[in-house]
Image: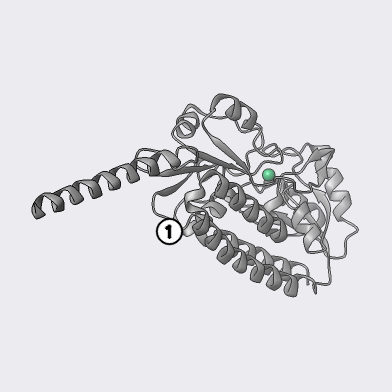
Amino acid sequence: MKIKSILLCIIAALCLMLTGCGSDTASTSSDKSDNKDGSVRIVTTFYPMYIDAINIAKGIDGVTVTNMTKPQTGCLHDYQLTTEDMKTLEKADILIANGAGMESFLDKVIKEQKKLTVIDASKDMELLETDGEKNPHLWLSVTADIQQVKNITEQLKKADPKHADAYQANADAYIQKLEALKKEMHDTLDKVPHKDIVTFHEAFPYFAKEFGLKIIAVVEREPGSEPTPSELQEVIQQIKPLSTKVLFTEPQYSPSAAQTIARETGAKIYTLDPVVTGEANADAMDAYLVTMRKNMNTLKEALQ
Ligand SMILES: [Zn+2]
């Protein structure tokens, strides 16, 4: 009699456990962690988003982050999706995009990949305009980059509520590092005596605005296309009257136009890195912090 009741108890307990598990699985079907193995696959459009994402998803079991584009792709102006990209997106649960017009393929993705949650890092952010177009290079202002981290985290928490606390804790830790970087950059750059700069592509308006610099000319109006001779002449005329003639190329672009301008004007050439290229691995975790400090030191030297 006693053994029978113990057995009944065990059976009852097992039943409870099983139904408990069953309802638990069912309750998560609305969020993004409903893959059979409970994993969440995040894909980012390009390097700055990858850096943010691996910081926010750092060390969370079952959450993976993949960068869709190649290490050398750089900015996504006029980028066309490849077959390989489409396959990557098909397997993803969440896509993190910069937004603000950087990814012109985004509408197509939203239409074709109905199951994919698309996160817009620039949601509701105030945008600068260059030549009548929205400028998407928000991440180059540290203040705007912090806001992008916050935007991504908010939307990630909604898409994958199971890991909400972990995302938030990681984001808070990363934002602390970004705040320290911002302070250090202000301490250094607010004091430089010269403020006029010439850059290579339209990547730096947010950066310039944050640190009180003035972009007086941009060498390459259309990314990836060499300036015409008359455009070159125009830039040369703009640089000639400056007391401190400095020109900032980018590691992602051929330096030949910059060398021509330097020859004609006596301007010194430096390199500013818009943090758009790099291997998608663990080293990328601190890539923004490291590269922005390097940019700070370059500007400090160039604008003395
Ligand atoms: Zn760009």
Residue holding disc 1:
59
97 displayed left or right of 242: left
Residue 34 appearing in the image: no
Q: Residue at x 66, y 37 (%)?
A: 77
- Residue 88 visible to an observer of this rendering: yes
Determine the image quadrant of residue 74.
top right
**Residue sitting at x 87%, y 65%:** 243
Neighbourhood count class around disc 1 (C-alpha, 10 Å): few under 14, some 14–19, many 20 upward:
few
Quadrant for ligand 1 reads top right
Q: How many marks?
A: 1
The residue lying toward the viewer, choosing from 5 and 74, is 5
- Tell which residue pokes out farthest to the front in this image: 1
Q: Residue at x 48, y 26 (%)?
A: 83
Q: Nearer the viewer, residue 174 or 5?
A: 5
- Tell me residue 201's x, y (percent): 72, 46
Q: Does residue 252 appear left or right of residue 279 in this picture?
A: right
Rendered location of residue 6, percent (x, y) = 14, 53
Q: x%, y% of residue 35?
A: 40, 38
* Residue 230 versus residue 236 in the image, above or below: above
Give percent across and percent down for residue 114. 54, 28
- Looking at the rendered structure, the kind of residue marked 1 is Gly
Element class at badge 1: loop
Can you say which quadrant of the picture contains the C terminus?
bottom right
**Foreground of the two, 119 or 263:** 119
For the point 56% across and 50% down, the residue is 157
| For residue 120, side relative to residue 5 (left or right) | right
Q: Nearer the viewer, residue 122 or 156?
A: 156
